[in-house]
Image (spheres, rainbow, N blue to C red):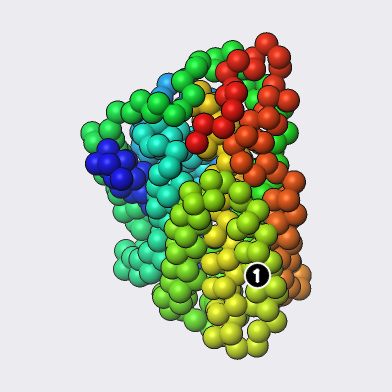
Amino acid sequence: MSAQVRITVVLLFAAWFIDYVDRLAIATILPTIGDEFDLDLGRQGLVVSVFFVAYAAAQIPGGMLADRFGAKRVTCWALLAWSLFTALTGLAWSFTALLLVRFAFGAAEGIFPSASMKALVERTSLAERMGAQGLIMSSNSIASVVAPLAVPPLAALVGWRWAFVSAALLGVLVYFAVRWWLPAPAERTEDIVRPSDGVPVREVLRIGVLWRFALMLFGYSTVAWGLSTWIPSYLSTERGLSLTSAGVLMAVPSLAAALGTLLGGRLSDRLEGHHRKVIVPAMSVSAPALCLMAVSPGLAGSVACGTVAIFAASLCYMPIFAVPLRSLPPGLVGVGSAVIVFGGQVAGMVVPPVLGVIADAVSFEAAFAVLALGPVLTALVALATPQDTESFTAALRHRTPRADRSVLPEKETS
């Protein structure tokens, strides 16, 4: 990678890392917050899911903002706003106040993902794009290691409220780093440079192929958010571990997820898309591993099966984005990627409270077994989506109004 791309990767990695630490912090100490506000598991799940309601709703407006005002500017806006609401989480005085703050926090973070993807597309070539994105998105899994290890001990030391304030300060530091050091966009001769202002957002939202990729991400995210939300509570309440010990144990599957994301990005570049070759076999492993995790009588077996499940699912994260990010015109990257990310956030909105209700009514084991439906869905939809730039572009041209088709590439440009 060039120096410009390396700096971009480091800064966006840092932004995504603090993004995930801030949102995962509440899951790592959810039992403590539940005790303070006297919340059952269903309402604890609602605290997590209300974030995703706003996060999902902000995806497409965030993509529109990134396309209009620029990726760097919107990224900085998002960093400042979500850091503010992270700090305000520590000031919540009731369950209702907590829900309102987490809703605002979700809206602030929701404008970030499409801006980040647009920033990367503007600064990378096709050949290095998905590998670079895989490095950036591995930050999510690294944060999944760090948050459970750092937040519970910090909360035990200074209280859970001050733990959120401390996390907010890190977000402010990353804001200044991005503002000062993110390189300017590079001109890439292989990219489509024709303007895309002629395609109304409402027409982009009607492109069915984008929603199929969103549905794939929904299936993947049921696994990611189902496990990250409820594993700490499961290990604490069902296995008798302290939250700190649970955080240490969660490092194993989280590191496996980071490795899977990195490998998935590299495979995406080598395969030039063709996500079916990765997603179908990987999700065929993830689904039964989740079922085995649910029925495993021992802690070691449960953790091992969960690690296999999240590793296999994480292999699919970057392949889901590979063809769209290689194929969308630059002027549509913000909104187009936002449509796909929206699918994943709907899963984050729906899955935590549903699993909480199942865990309350039946058991955690039954709730984890239900997660196996996510990999099955992703694998099935992967069979019905374009596998390369040429077929993706053909699908776009078929669904885009005739007057606006001039903004789309005539042929594959990789």
Tell me: residue 225, above or below residue 73: below
Is residue 309 toward the left or the right of residue 114 in the image?
right
Q: Residue furthest bottom?
A: 298
Q: Horizontal and vertical percent for residue 384? A: 75, 46
Residue 251 found in image quarter: bottom left
| Residue drawn at x 33%, y 28% as measured from the top left | 186
* Relative depth, front residue between 83 and 74: 74
Residue that label 1 marks: 285
Query: Is residue 103 among the parts visible in the rendering?
Result: no
* Relative depth, front residue between 199 and 300: 199
Is residue 188 toward the left or the right of residue 205 in the image?
left
- Amino acid type at circle 1 is Val
Query: Is residue 327 among the parts visible in the rendering?
Result: yes
Tell me: residue 34, above or below residue 210: below
* Relative depth, front residue between 170 and 346: 346
Q: Horizontal and vertical percent for residue 222? A: 65, 57
